[in-house]
Image (tube, rainbow, N blue to C red):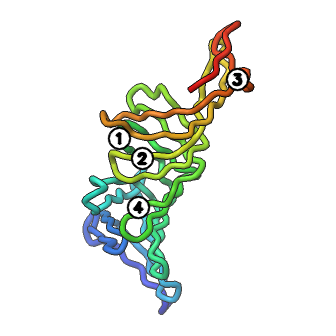
């Protein structure tokens, strides 16, 4: 087709820069739809190709994607199949594996994401999260905390703030109203922050 081009790297991987988005990657192959002004980057690696921010303030924020579309009309990189993004001590899992990066390395807000902190103990899980990732060491947002009581029943606590403290550890706070009848142990109700 005269309006499409298919490119394959001569070696295992070739560096591709996304200067408008301020990202770089090593790509095995890509297709260029000239009429639609879109590029589709593909990787056969299990987790996909790595995409790394070149913005100095993002401290090499990165993610992996097996398939990424870059539209030259709006310059939004649309990554699919992203399993996680590591930020500070957390593993952030985008809803449906979708991550969009706008001009100047601005990652769009992740809606309905999951954050697990920390990556070693995996003790805390935040669900239904709306998260803004600013760098490899900083994110913030809101969400729900999955609390498991002594009877092994899960409860959701809404958190007004999730973020990173000065020690680069995830913190969160929320309020449990007295009308919630929140039981933390047999015969023990909790209310407060």
Gap in angstroms between the C-alphas marked 2 and 4: 27 Å
Q: Quadrant of the C terminus?
A: top right
The answer to which of marks 1 and 4 sits earlier in the sequence is 4
Task: Look at the numbered disc 1 and give the secondary structure of its residue.
Answer: loop
Task: Look at the numbered disc 4 and give the secondary structure of its residue.
Answer: loop
Left or right: 60 as drawn, with respect to 182: left
The answer to which of marks 2 and 1 sits earlier in the sequence is 1
Residue 51 image point, x, y percent: 35, 59
The answer to which of marks 3 and 4 sits earlier in the sequence is 4
Residue contact at pointers 2 and 1, CB within 8 angstroms: yes
Left or right: 127 as drawn, with respect to 5: right
Task: Look at the numbered disc 2 and give the secondary structure of its residue.
Answer: strand
Q: Residues within 10 Å of mark 2 (few under 14, many from 20)?
A: some
The answer to which of marks 2 and 4 sits earlier in the sequence is 4
Q: Nearer the viewer, residue 35 or 61?
A: 61
Gap in angstroms between the C-alphas marked 2 and 3: 30 Å
- Establish if 102 lies above or below 99: below
Q: Which residue is mark 3?
A: 178
Residue 112 image point, x, y percent: 60, 48
Task: Look at the numbered disc 3 and give the secondary structure of its residue.
Answer: helix
Residue 83 image point, x, y percent: 48, 48
Q: Nearer the viewer, residue 180 or 136?
A: 180
Gap in angstroms between the C-alphas marked 1 and 3: 34 Å
- Establish if 91 lies above or below 108: above
Q: Residues within 10 Å of mark 1 (few under 14, many from 20)?
A: many
Question: What is the number of the mark on residue 88?
Answer: 1
Gap in angstroms between the C-alphas marked 3 and 4: 52 Å
Q: Which residue is mark 4?
A: 43
Question: What is the number of the mark on residue 139?
Answer: 2
**Residue in the picture at 50% in, 49% down:** 131
């Amino acid at each position: 087709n005269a309006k499409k081009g298919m490119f394959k790297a001569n070696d295992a991987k070739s560096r591709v820069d996304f200067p408008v988005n301020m990202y770089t990657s090593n790509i095995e192959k890509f297709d260029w739809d000239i009429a639609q002004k879109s590029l589709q980057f593909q990787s056969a690696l299990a987790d996909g190709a790595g995409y790394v921010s070149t913005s100095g303030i993002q401290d090499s924020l990165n993610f992996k994607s097996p398939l990424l579309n870059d539209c030259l009309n709006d310059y939004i990189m649309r990554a699919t199949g992203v399993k996680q993004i590591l930020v500070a001590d957390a593993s952030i899992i985008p809803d449906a594996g979708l991550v969009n990066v706008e001009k100047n390395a601005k990652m769009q807000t992740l809606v309905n994401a999951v954050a697990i902190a920390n990556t070693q103990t995996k003790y805390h899980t935040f669900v239904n999260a709306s998260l803004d990732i600013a760098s490899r060491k900083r994110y913030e947002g809101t969400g729900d905390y999955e609390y498991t009581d002594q009877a092994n029943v899960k409860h959701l606590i809404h958190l007004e703030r999730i973020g990173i403290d000065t020690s680069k550890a995830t913190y969160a706070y929320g309020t449990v109203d007295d009308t919630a009848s929140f039981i933390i142990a047999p015969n023990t109700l909790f209310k407060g922050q």
